[in-house]
Image: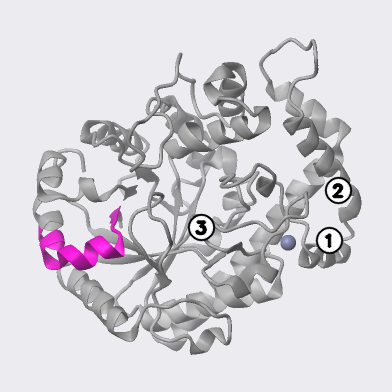
Amino acid sequence: MAIRSFYVSWDHAVRNGDGLLENLARWTNLNAIELTNYDSDWGPTYKEVGSLVFPSEAPFKGLGLRLTTKERFARLQRFMESARSKGFHVVCNFAPLYANSRRFVPMACVDVTGAIVPGHNNLPAYGCPNNPDVVKYGQTMIRETMATWTSADLIAVNHVEFPFWANSSLHENFACFCDSCKARAVARGLDLTAVRRDVKTLYDSITAGPTEGSVPRPLSPSDVLNYLVKHPNIGLWLDFRMQSMSEYISAVVKAGREAAKDHKRKVRVGLEFLPPTVSDVVGTDFASLYGMFDWISPKLVPEYLTASVIPRVVEYATKSRAPDHPLLMSAIRQLFALGAAPPSYRKMSDQTEGLTYSNTFDPSAIDNQMRYLTPLVGKVDIHPYTWIHHRDPAALKKKLEKFRSYGLDGYFIWGWEHNLSEDALRKARKAF
Ligand SMILES: [Zn+2]
């Protein structure tokens, strides 16, 4: 069955209630709404990620998590019930590696410089999948979701990947070397000290910038291949990360399946992950994991990667404006098959949608990613995740048509409040 979902922030859902659901039913053929396990407004402009959407802190035993009040939880429950009664599936966007408590900091990833990795969107910590307490937290969270989100019939496991946003530094992308990882590496016979030395050398060479007198030239895939030949520890490290994340994902999903049985609930569990060309590098082995999910949602193709994340990485590496380094900007996106770079970068004046530049999307990137997904067609339901940007339903329509050309009728869409007004939905009705 094709799921056609739109993301809605809790604040918006509660403010607009049944009116929103009626507009969605009237103007679109969407059959699902996606709500997060954080009670928050749209990112990334919101200043503080909200409380976790659970009725009781008790199962999380002393983690000091911020939770919604009981009254608020009941209100959110009513909205979900209303959505179900109007024929919508309710999807929980489930991000188990983030936590909103300072007490979580000792369980966070430690990067190659020894710094604690902060969570996305101002959260205090980014949990390490090798830490047994992080595993417990993820398992408790999925059990509680099964038990308390009684109207949600889909759980989309999201952000089960190592840090890549470069939120406040570049070194946070070079994780993890925490004590739990050290113990895990010993058990697997991996010399994490030697690995860390090589990763640090790589990090230092990236941040050192070009050497004096060197001529700028495009970075090519052969540079990466040859680097790996000479520094096999980098490959071993990436593989170690991916195995660690796979074990973590399996443990969390298994706990969720058991909880569904215990509560006699039919809940489908899916996996949301970065574009296939990026996914392995951040540790999400979708090609091996798909069998444990009812569906998968590859992100095709988040514009924030080319419009914000890559420019931020280039800025940290070069300590100067990203558009001044077109060869490097272009090379990184080519390495990940994210399509051609624009001839020049247009800065966004409005940061509502989290993009630094407005013109970095190339539709060929979707075809590039589909090469990795077509072998899975027919083996697992594939509902690509995509974004509506620039209040442009025509551009969204093209993306959805592209998915259909590959036989994929379902999709998940991330949009913003301005995409959900009745007027915006009416104008976009031919896009969905
Ligand atoms: Zn770790």
Q: Residues within 10 Å of mark 3 (few under 14, many from 20)?
A: some
Q: Amino acid at mark 3?
A: Asn
Q: Nearer the viewer, residue 340 or 12?
A: 12
- N-terminal label among 1 and 2: 1
Residue 213: x percent and y percent?
Answer: 79, 10
- N-terminal label among 3 and 2: 3
Real-space Cα separation, disc 3 to disc 2, in angstroms: 29 Å
Q: Are marks 1 and 2 in contact (CB under 8 Å)?
A: yes
215 versus 303 height, above or below: above
In the displayed structure image, the side of residue 324 where residue 245 appears, left or right: right
Q: Nearer the viewer, residue 274 or 14?
A: 14
In the displayed structure image, the side of residue 27 where residue 225 appears, left or right: right
- Mark 3, secondary structure of its residue: loop
Residue 256: x percent and y percent?
Answer: 50, 76
Our reading of the magenta stretch's main secondary structure is helix
115 versus 372 height, above or below: below
Image disc number at residue 185? 1
User: Quadrant location of residue 429?
Assistant: top left
Mark toward the viewer: 3 or 2 = 3
Real-space Cα separation, disc 1 to disc 2, in angstroms: 10 Å
- Mark 2, secondary structure of its residue: helix
Q: Are marks 3 and 1 in contact (CB under 8 Å)?
A: no
Query: Mark 3 = which residue?
Result: 122
Q: Nearer the viewer, residue 13 or 85?
A: 13
Q: Amino acid at mark 1?
A: Ala
The residue located at (69%, 60%) in the rendering is 109
Q: Residues within 10 Å of mark 1 (few under 14, many from 20)?
A: many
Query: Mark 2 = which residue?
Result: 195
The residue located at (12%, 67%) in the rendering is 18
291 versus 350 height, above or below: below
Residue stretch in magenta = 4-22
- Mark 1, secondary structure of its residue: helix
